[in-house]
Image (cartoon, grey):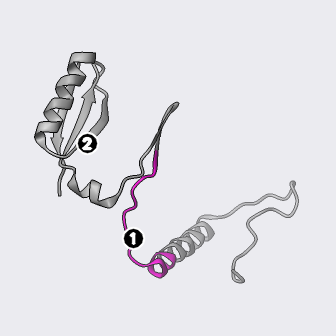
Amino acid sequence: MAGLRRRIARSPTEPNRTDQREATRKLVGLVERARQNGREQGPLVPVEALITVDEEEWVWQVVDRNVLDSLSHRLVFQSSAGQRREILMTAGIDAAMDAASRIVELDGGCVLIETLDP
């Protein structure tokens, strides 16, 4: 951090301008620092979301890894406007068919059953 230059004007009236060459130099430095930080962090691993927020609806998603591994199908509700919304996941096609038929009976519309990739 000692080699970084001041980026905030000392006074509000002092103009803070950068020419093309200086801007390129600063961008090259920024990209190199980002790459160096990435190398220091090591390989990234995916992290499951613990909460999903959709407008006013908050869905907590704390699930044991063994349960996640046993799921095989996803039910997706497709509205008449064409918007897709994941409803739930099941372990097995029979449970998925049963849940989808009940949802269609209650709400109508279209429920898609998708297989989860291993």
Residue plotted at (29% across, 38% down): 88
Q: Is residue 45 magenta?
A: yes
Q: Quadrant of the N terminus?
A: bottom right
Residue type at the position of mark 1? Leu
Figure quadrant of residue 21:
bottom right
Q: Indicate whether 70 appears above or below 114.
A: below
Residue plotted at (17% across, 24% down): 101
Report the residue marked by disc 1.
44
Secondary element at tag 2 = strand
- Magenta-colored span: 36-51
Which mark is on residue 28?
none
Secondary element at tag 1 = loop
Q: Is residue 81 magenta?
A: no
Give the spatial CA distance, label 2 vs label 1.
26 Å
Which callout, 2 or 1, points to the residue nearer the camera? Answer: 2
Crowdedness of circle 1 by 10 Å Cα count: few (<14), some, many (20+)? few
Residue 108 visible in the picture? no
Residue plotted at (39% across, 70% down): 44
Q: Indicate whether 28 appears above or below 49.
A: below
Report the residue marked by disc 2.
89
Where does residue 45 sit, x and y in percent of width and height?
37, 68
- Which one is in front, 103 or 22? 103
